[in-house]
Amino acid sequence: MSALLGLLRKEVYHILRDRRTLVVIVALPVLQVIIFGYAIRTDVDHVRLAIVDPAPDTVTLGIRARFAAAGVFEDVALVPRIEQLEDLFRRGAAQGAVVFEAGFAERLARGLPAGLLIIADATEPNTGSIVASYATAVVQGYQQEAPPSNGAIHIVPSVRMRFNPTRESSNLFVPGLMAFVLTIISSLMTAISLTREKETGTLEALLVSPLRPWQIIVGKVAPYLVVGFASVVGVILEARLVFHVPLRGSLVLLLAEGIVFILVSLSLGILISARTSSQRVAMMGALIGTMLPTMLLSGFIFPLESMPWPLRAISVIVPARWFVLVARSIMLKGVGLSYLWQPTLVLLVMALVLLTASTRAFHERLDQ
Amino acid sequence: MRRILFLARAEVLHVVRDRATLAQVLIVPVLQLLVLSNAATFLVTNTPTYVVDFDRTSVSRGLVTRFRASGHFLVDEQSASPELANEALLRGDATMVLTIPHDFEATLVRTGSAPIQLTVNAEKGSAAGIVQSYATSIAAAYASELESSVRGASLGGSDAPPVRGVPKIDLRVRSWYNPALNYKYYMVPGILVALVTLIGTLLTAQNIAREKELGTLEQLNVTPMTRGQFIAAKLLPFWALGMLNLAIGLLVGALVFGVPMRGSLLLLFGAAAVYLVAALAIGLWISSVVDTQQQAMFVTFFVMNVYLLMSGLFTPIDSMAPWVRTVSQLNPVRHFVTISRAILMKGAGPADIAQPFLILTIFGAVTLALAIRQYSKRVA
């Protein structure tokens, strides 16, 4: 037991001594939460709007006033001809445009349809469609205020946003961020720390020591488990204090699921280090094998439903996918195990299989 | 100049000799481009929808059919039980619940206006906004469809008073630059920039750190090379590699994804030439600050993480908090992503990209100077 403690102490020294890496480990989660809270947002606001009004009259001025009052638009340019828009859009000075036909009010007065064109910069398709739908809503609002006609039919949708009424992006990202941070610390750091002992030849020294193989693994892995756990708590705290992300479900359940996920990531780290011989390869392996899938195929940033089926199929074996699902449901929906037993079971099975496989891989190396 | 070429040649040999590295820099990016472009999409399709139809009339069924036919919604389950719908929402089987109240048709006929309720799982805030805008526009389209059929019927009836058409605004919507709303057109240029940057910066960051670890840096230090020559020789091969990567990536983008190339490719490569100097100089600077390859990788990873996430690559810059937008002016990745999207998708010319290009040039000059300054021939 004292041998195990010695190994643990050595590992803690390793972590504490390398200041630059330590700073990255500590600063990364903190900074990530801030970046995701403030930078990774998709709300469309302050839309830069250009207006093409060749002959302003009462109606076009009325509609323009409604655009100004809508709150989401900022008038950036008023040009007389549609050809001048191209330049504004190319420079990114305008994101949307409203184009009135000349003689707008006059045509309406004579009972003719008056042309109104809404142009949205759809380079980014979602922003494009939201800009277009905002603008359409403004024009429709104007029309509805016009005297009601016979036979006009409206279906009035009342929309309720459940679980995240203000549609805060940070509410969505924090659960995913926990998975991301845990993957970096658990998989990447473990993989590198084990391969470093291999590279420098000190692993041999450990192997001939009276330590049993499982003790070596526990000794190498336990400090990272603690670091991982601490950073999860840190992320949750920061998310609550700075961004007021709700935690509607049980904190204990969330932390317990976190530990299961840490075990999965640690085992992956051990597996990678057992198969590689240099830090560089281990690093690349960990990046491609764990970080990228966590970032892309967990539903953390990009919705899984929109991906082609081969990617969705692969996502089933990505542990982070299940953890993100569980963490999100606990934090935002406030549901308990009765709803989450399936993904929890998947995580537990993954942890079991990977732990066995990684201890095996470690043993095999001992036999060589 | 000859000295620079000699050292540059040594670097090229290092990369070419090691098959794994060569594969890593030439083939992996192409694979990543193929996979990432499919994975990185905020496109909202096939929203699983639960319908609670209390009305059960032809009008309410018509509305459900419109939702189904739109392609945006996948109507899986249907019942008249709000509890079951709530269950589905909690379990995550449904993302939206469409509730049509009793007397929907009757109210619509009597007063011309009837409510429906949309309950959206807004965990994913942005997707929920898109779902809402799709749903609202489907409802509006169905309403005007009903309106014209009612009007048609009443016009046909002989005793009905002729309904005079209210002056109508003929509203049209056009999506410029990406009318099909293809997400890949938006992502491919961005991902390409990210890959070129990541590979270039990682390789250069590792480079000097590796020479430090191996001890060969000291050998270089005793040669008559100046600091500027040293940095130039380290930069040149990776700069060329980056340009090659960009060319390959553009080719794949055009052939596989059909990404539009409306502007001048020459302009794009010109901007890339400046941008790569800035990106690689950051890598070299990191490399001369750190002691080991591991540190080099961690620091690069950290810096790139911040740069890429704040570049507007994944989410639009316009949506970021105001102070982040200001800070991101210092981010070279942001400017090059803007430039490449403007050139490829909008067909922007030199005048349109003048501002970001100028910032890139200044950035490149400053980081290069920093890298040269940081690299000292003395060993601490």
Image (cartoon, coloured by chain):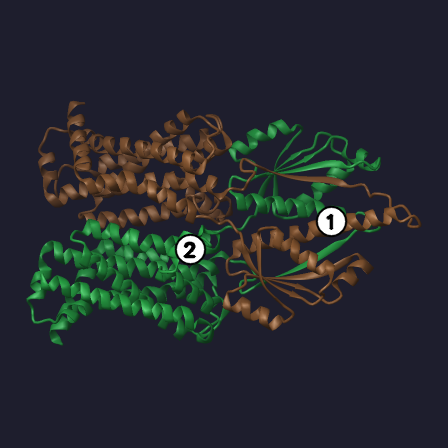
Residue A3, by quadrant, is bottom left
Give the camera-side residue of A24 and A292.
A292
Q: Which residue is drawn at 14% across and 43% down?
A: B212
Residue B145 left/right relative to B165: left
Please say whether residue A3 is visible from this viewpoint. yes
Work out whether disc 1 and disc 2 sit on a shared chain: no
Q: As rendered, which of B75 and B21 lies closer to the eye? A: B75
Label 1: state its secondary structure: helix
In the figure, B363 relative to A291: above or below? above
- Which residue lies at the image location 55% right of the left edge and 48% below the top edge? A44
Q: How crowded is mark 1: few (under 14 residues within 10 Å), some or many (20 or more)?
A: few
> Residue at coordinates 38% horizontally, 34% vertically from top-left?
B250
Which chain does brown denote in the image?
A: B
Q: Residue B145 carries which label?
A: 1
- Residue position marked by numbered label 2 in the rendering: A312
Chain assignment, label 2: A
Residue B248, relative to residue A322: is it above or below?
above
Q: Where is residue B147 in the image (x, y as percent from the top left)?
A: 77, 50
Q: What element carries label 2?
A: helix
**What percent of the width, then of the height, locates residue B230?**
18, 32
Alpha-carbon span between mark 1 and mark 2: 37 Å
Three-letter amino acid code at disc 2? Arg
Q: In which quarter of the image is the N terminus of chain B?
A: top left
Can you tell which chain is drawn green? A
Image mark 1: chain = B
Name the amino acid, label 1: Glu
Q: In which quarter of the image is residue B355?
A: top left
Q: Where does the image place residue A310, in percent across and percent down from the top left?
A: 40, 52
Give the image location of residue B213, x and y in percent. 13, 45
Work out which quarter of the rendered image holds the C terminus of chain B and state it: top left
The answer to the question of whether label 1 and label 2 lie on touching residues, with beta carbons closer than 8 A, is no
